[in-house]
Image (cartoon, rainbow, N blue to C red):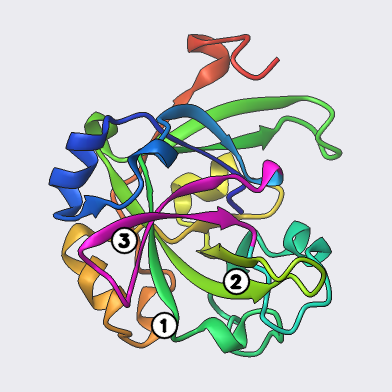
């Protein structure tokens, strides 16, 4: 799965890489650890405005939801079943790029995960990339506030990620740069399921930064 990521690049570099402008620069905050369970606002690009980098909350809330509690279960969406699940099927044609330059997973060293090893995964040189995402707009029935939210799609793990994420054997869909526009232009979702994969590399953080998440 993918519940922890990072985006440490500066605004100008992000704008140059994605050929888009950040709409509200005050919301743009590079960080070494984005925890999905905080439901943070992170930079994304939606299909309706590919020239704009905006900020949506991680944790998709479908338009029919009575409250926001569902977002704890919708940080990720399995690409194999995304068009079947009620939480996601209304968003399969609402595509977005979720901007990052790394994500984190834990290898289970025992059957129950009591001992774990932390890894940072990304592409070479810590370059920027985009997760394949889908999004939704939800209106809070109590306040009238409109909330823009998204989920990251996951797929079967490749050999590297199956070794690292050995309890679930899943990985996020990291798009090739040349496929980012195709994703936004609604190419069939199944084209992006494994064996589709980016050139991912991993670093054992227990050996590099042993207290990073302690």
Q: Quadrant of the C terminus?
A: top right
Per the image, the residue denoted by label 3 is 175
Sequence-first tag of 1 and 2: 2
Earlier-in-chain disc, 3 versus 2:
2
Q: Is residue 125 magenta?
A: no
Depicted 182 relative to depicted 59: above or below? below
In this picture, residue 153 sits left or right of residue 200: right
Crowding around mark 3 (Cα neighbors within 10 Å: few <14, some 14 to 19, many 20+) is many
Taking the spot 86% from the left edge, 38% from the top edge, the residue there is: 112
Q: Which mark is residue 189?
A: 1
Could you say whether the residue bearing mark 1 is in a helix, strand or loop?
helix
Magenta part of the chain: 38-59
Q: Along the horizontal axis of the image, is 170 left or right of 103?
A: right
Would you name the residue on which mark 2 appears? 78
Mark 1 and 3 residues: CB-CB less than 8 Å, in contact? no
69 and 202: which one is in front? 69
Task: Give the answer, above or below, for where 178 lies relative to 160.
Answer: below
Q: Is residue 94 left or right of residue 63?
A: left
Q: Which mark, by number, is residue 128?
A: none
Picture coordinates of residue 111, whole percent (x, y)? 83, 39
Q: Are marks 1 and 2 in contact (CB under 8 Å)?
A: no
Closer-to-camera residue (163/100): 100
93 to 42, vertically: above or below: below
- The Cα–Cα distance between marks 3 and 2, rounded to whole angstroms, is 15 Å
Neighbours of disc 2 within 10 Å: few (<14), some (14-19), many (20+): many
Q: Residue at x 21, y 72 (%)?
A: 181
The x, y position of residue 5, in whole percent, is 51, 39
Quadrant in which the N terminus appears: bottom right
Compute the Cα span from label 1 to label 2: 11 Å
């Amino acid at each position: 799965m993918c519940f922890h990521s990072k985006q440490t690049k500066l605004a100008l570099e992000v704008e140059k890489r994605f050929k888009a402008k950040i709409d509200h620069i005050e919301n743009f905050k590079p960080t070494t650890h984005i925890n999905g369970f905080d439901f943070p606002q992170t930079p994304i690009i939606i299909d309706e405005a590919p020239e704009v980098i905006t900020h949506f909350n991680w944790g998709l809330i479908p338009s029919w939801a009575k409250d926001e509690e569902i977002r704890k279960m919708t940080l990720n969406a399995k690409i194999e079943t995304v068009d079947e699940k009620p939480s996601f099927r209304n968003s399969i044609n609402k595509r977005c790029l979720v901007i990052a330059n790394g994500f984190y997973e834990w290898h289970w060293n025992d059957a129950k995960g009591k001992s774990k090893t932390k890894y940072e995964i990304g592409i070479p040189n810590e370059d920027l990339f985009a997760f394949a995402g889908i999004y939704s707009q939800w209106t809070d029935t109590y306040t009238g506030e409109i909330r823009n939210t998204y989920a990251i799609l996951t797929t079967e793990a490749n050999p590297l990620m199956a070794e690292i994420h050995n309890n679930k054997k899943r990985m996020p869909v990291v798009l090739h740069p040349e496929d980012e526009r195709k994703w936004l232009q609604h190419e069939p979702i199944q084209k992006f399921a494994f064996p589709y994969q980016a050139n991912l590399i991993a670093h054992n953080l227990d050996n590099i930064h042993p207290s990073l998440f302690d």
